[in-house]
Image (cartoon, rainbow, N blue to C red):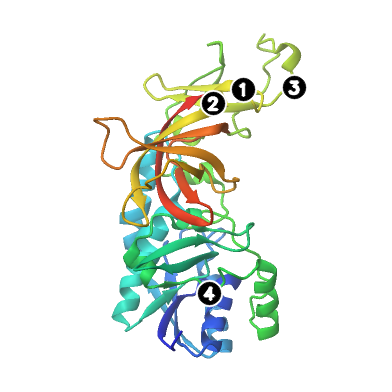
Amino acid sequence: MKPQRVVVGLSGGVDSAVSAWLLKQQGHEVVGIFMKNWEDDDSEYCSSNVDFVDAAAVADVIGIEVEHVNFAADYKDRVFAQFLREYQAGRTPNPDVLCNAEIKFKAFLDHAMRLGAEKIATGHYARVREHGDSFQLLKGLDPLKDQSYFLHRLSQAQLSKTLFPVGDVPKTEVRRIAAEAGLPNAKKKDSTGICFIGERPFREFLKRYLANTPGPIKDDRGRTIGEHVGLSFYTLGQRKGIGIGGLKERGVPRGSGEHAPWFVARKDMGANTLYIVQGHDHPWLLSQRLGADDASWIAGHAPTRGGLAAKTRYRQQDAECTFAGAAVGAAVGAFELCFEQAQWAVTPGQSAVLYDGEVCLGGGVIAASTSA
């Protein structure tokens, strides 16, 4: 690739740092941008200030400029507002998917173009491949770090301007490169919190923004066995934090499965009722089919063949499935998937992302599922 002006999103983490270093070694004119997407409210949990110091230190070692850009207003309007609407409706959204589509590859891309960039780059573990006159999004070569799931809403225009320098590098090698290059964050641990929340207590954070109306917790036989604090604060498949201790004392027999854990299985928003079941493989937790909407396809159109694979959550193996367009009269952008093996805790609001081998095709937002 001929030398180009590349604007790199420097997060303060090791992946984006090595991305910038690799690009500089390849002879590109590299400029760093640090994106502030959330206004500091809890210095205990928000690491933005520390991350910027780390990004600036990396830029100094590499020998590039870094600019601090505040996208917090864009984030609040484009990502956080939708995040709250989804939770209020009882769904469990994935803000990282929307952040990539709306902030990192839209607001940031636009800003980079104004700086004269020919390309942008991030530290995501994914790859872009030219295929004829179009672009494909491929999985990162490190299967434990592949982040194509979070990037499935990117368009042809966005991919055509994007580089993922560490997409074909194992994470262990990224760490080695950072250490050899003398990058100050070579051993910095990976962030695990949601992009804008950090690693703070999630329920306490949500309570600031969402009304909580308590209601009954019922089991699969319709017995009331507890009280929830508000349906928005639970997600399907959840095991911890349900708050149903002391069932024996309440006279609820549990038979031979007495010690089996309880899981959130359904939400009845109309009746404000949370349903929980006992046992990881309870039928209510298994789905053979799902319906999704708000589809986004990387090629610009839906897949043309039915036999593909999909993920219904990030940390999941690809599951073989049949893709079908939605029924007549369904909303534009809706589709259905039928899985060969029942999927566990398919959760409305999460993304169903389709793959053809290593090629990420796109996906949509899970609307509903049908039990096995």
Which of label 1 and label 2 is nearer to you?
A: 1
Badge 1 or badge 2: first in the primary sequence: 2
Residue at 55% x, 64% y is: 125
Q: Nearer the viewer, residue 128 or 202?
A: 128
Circle number at residue 55: none
User: From mark 3 to mark 1, how far is it between C-alphas?
Assistant: 14 Å
Badge 3 or badge 1: first in the primary sequence: 3
* Label 4 sits on residue: 165
User: From mark 1 to mark 4, how far is it between C-alphas?
Assistant: 43 Å
User: From mark 4 to mark 2, how far is it between C-alphas?
Assistant: 40 Å
* Label 1 sits on residue: 282
The x and y percentages for residue 169 are 62, 70
The x and y percentages for residue 281 are 64, 26
Q: Residues within 10 Å of mark 3 (few under 14, many from 20)?
A: few
Occupied quadrant, residue 75: bottom left
Q: Secondary structure at mark 1?
A: loop
Badge 4 or badge 2: first in the primary sequence: 4
Residue at 51% x, 83% y is: 23
